[in-house]
Image (cartoon, rainbow, N blue to C red):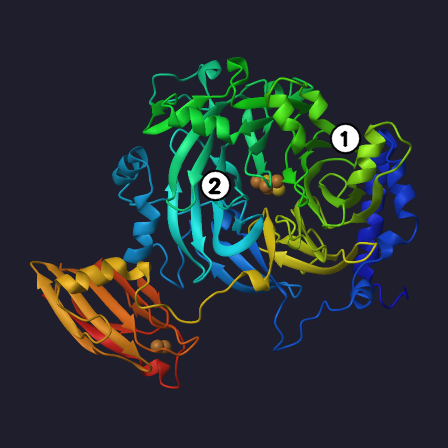
Amino acid sequence: MSEEKNTGCTRRDLFDTSLKVAAVGGLVGLTGRWAVMGGGSALALAPGAAAAAGNVEVAPGQLDEYYGFWSGGQSGEVRVLGLPSMRELMRIPVFNRDSATGWGSTNESLKILSEGLTPESKAFLKKQNRVTFDHGDTHHPRPSYTNGSYDGRYLFINDKSNTRIARIRLDVMKTDKILEIPNAHAIHGLRLQRYPKTGYVFCNSEMRIPMPNDGTILDDPKKYTCVFTAVDGDTMKVAWQVMVSGNLDNNDTDYAGKYVASTCYNSEEGTDTAAMTASPTDHAVFFDIKAIEEAVKGGKGQMIAGIPVVDGRKEAKSPFTRYIPVANSPHGCNASPDGKYLMLNGKLSPTVTVVEWAKLDDLFAGKITERECIVADPEVGLGPLHTTFDGRGNAYTSVFLDSQIVKWNIADAIKQFKGEKVNPIRQKLDVHYQVGHTNASQAESKDADGKWLVALCKFSKDRFLNVGPLKPENDQLIDISGDEMKLVHDGPAFAEPHDATIVHRSKIKPVDLWDRNDPYFADLRAQAKKDKVELATASTIIREGSKVRVYMYSAAPSFSMTEFKVKLGDEVTVIITNTDDVSDLTHGFTLVGHNVCMEIGPQASASITFRADRPGVHYYYCQWFCHALHMEMQGRMLVEV
Ligand code: K7E
Ligand code: CUA
């Protein structure tokens, strides 16, 4: 690679990282790393590598081959990217509020944001003069499955900060259900049933709390419990919960619909860092779905907050769970796409523990021990967090402290575990810096195709122009189609996309226009029927005491009502139907000075309610540039005293 092709930046980073890692490496004997990398492979960075890899650039007008569903981390949203271009295509508001679309302000979104909350949260929020939480912390976006393949129906995601999960409809790319999980505290791990379909959404409560958490038990951590939750993804109702030992971290499911597993830290059940890491081992807990379903069906669950809960804690020695010991504080939990293995990523241990799903029948039957389910334990580097796959028998583990993606061969790791002299490590590639999740194209489904891999780095440090003390993350794109991994792109991202799922575009079929009969507008249709108005043709004001419903429609470039009059103090609901049936012709409704704004997609209806507490003339306008006369798309609300 010529000097010109390597930018100064690339070289500088490389040497920086190498020196740091070399210093640590001396302590822990990372000789394998140097043996594998040799002198040259780590230099295979962009842009030279990009040319070698080919097909990275998606020219203007061309479409990407993959959808990437990105968690928006602390922003509480989901982002849709195209791969390999890494262009951001859409942001889907979920747990956050959104100024562009009015998510969190429209009646439709407020219903979704509030109806699934627990009675305790509703009461709490009422005291705060709120109807919902304004903020979320998303980690794990997962598209729904049928028979182990993505089916394009839904995407589910967790909110750690307010113990919720959400469902996004992939036909319209909008959130349609949000559910708070009772008896839990901070939903972190989230994965979906793969077979026969989704099915269950499995949710990990990360923190241990008293059950019920009503103040009767306080500083008595021995009486705290963690629960593992199965939600029915179709009805978005909790199906059952299992009490477990330790703090649940990440989870994943098999490809047979029989088992689901979760990594746990803090088997010590302490409440501070020292106590949480005192023991050299923690565990992964494995759940027998059938056994739990049968117990719940047979009425053996204890009803807590209206949910059947079974006891799967270690000391209960129940038929529901088994605890496989792993090194202290494991993190990622990743099922291989061949349906055979589950990778438990060591985090504090430099290893990945491999469990074979097929052994679990015998484990639950008491025929073998927990340790006999482990078939490999390769040493990959310092701080293994998550593992992904290429569908060709290789695993790729993100290694946080070493800032590397480590490619290793699963079959060789199993041979090595049996005592054969083989090195499963294929390559170690430097990433920038401190990588968290990694995920490869289609790798969370049985259709893993081994083309692209993203390394979602927590730190970007000097990779981009400085934007102040808060730096973007760095989502790196790596070509894994050949024998060697090649870094081809740096992508800055805001507010921590912990995880992303990469889905082939053939699996997702979004629509261009809304269907007028969509369930999204069911409430509006019902209200319009009561008011005897036709949503798509109405220009009417319905008054019921001090409640006023203003029905209008929009057709570029005008609203069907260019003025309406209300009385000071009225509760006003504006209901607008966008009658344009042209792709991409979105209108908006923004009312100046009233905190009122909403998106109205083509053929959609949307509504927003506010109090007319300001006398005078207030203009409303369309905030989506829809037409040459878009600026003129406006009207006046007259508020009489
Ligand atoms: Cu590793 Cu929340 Cu999936 Cu972040 S978790 S990295
Ligand atoms: Cu309608 Cu701008």
**Disc assigned to residue 201:** 2
Q: Residue 476: percent from the left, percent from the top?
A: 69, 55
Q: 447 and 495: which one is in front? A: 447
Q: 631 and 384: which one is in front? A: 384
Question: Quick check: 236 above or below 559?
Answer: above
Q: Residue 39: percent from the left, percent from the top?
A: 93, 50
Q: Is residue 503 left or right of residue 624?
A: right
**Disc assigned to residue 348:** none
Tell me where residue 584 sits by quadrant.
bottom left
**Disc assigned to residue 377:** 1
- Label 1 element class: loop
User: Please, which residue is most extreme toward the bottom here?
Assistant: 628
Mark 1 neighbour density, 10 Å: few (under 14) some (14–19) many (20 or more) = many
Q: Residue 168: percent from the left, percent from the top?
A: 44, 53
Residue under the point 56% across and 60% down: 507
Amino acid type of the residue tagged 1 in the rendering: Asp
Residue under the point 68% across and 25% down: 326
Q: Residue 171: percent from the left, percent from the top?
A: 45, 62
Tell me the CA gap for discs 1 and 2: 29 Å
Whichever of callouts 1 and 2 sits on the residue coming sooner in the sequence is 2
